Image (cartoon, rainbow, N blue to C red):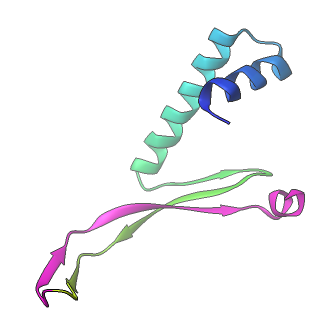
Amino acid sequence: MNNKEFISELASKTGFTLKDTSVLVAALAEEMAEQLEGENTLSISGFGTFEARKKLERVIINPATKQRMLVPPKISLNFKPSTTLKDKL
């Protein structure tokens, strides 16, 4: 399912117009991104938990050239589904 299909399905279930639903989905995604950029945990009841985790810098070795390289620190996104979602799947 792509974004257009998702918005169309959501609009038909909620009774909103496609334009209003599109704005709502965009606002939701933007707010989730802002919260996760601040390294907050975002829990959605019945769906799951999104968590931004910091990965520290580390040294790796290229197996082909045996060259050591430094991987810079980064923030990765982790999702843990709720038990309700797991049971539905």
Residue at x 76%, y 12% (from the top left corner): 16
Residue 59 occupies which quadrant of the picture?
bottom left
**Location of residue 48 with respect to 64 vertically, above or below:** above
In x, y percent, where is residue 84?
Answer: 85, 59
In x, y percent, where is residue 73?
Answer: 26, 68
Residue 55 occupies which quadrant of the picture?
bottom left
88 within the magenta span: yes
- Region rendered in magenta: 65-89
Side of 52 where 16 appears, left or right:
right
74 within the magenta span: yes
Side of 21 where 58 appears, left or right:
left
Residue at x 82%, y 63% (from the top left corner): 86
**Location of residue 16 with respect to 9 vertically, above or below:** above
Residue at x 80%, y 52% (from the top left corner): 46
**Location of residue 71 with respect to 37 vertically, above or below:** below
- Nearer the observer, 42 or 71: 71
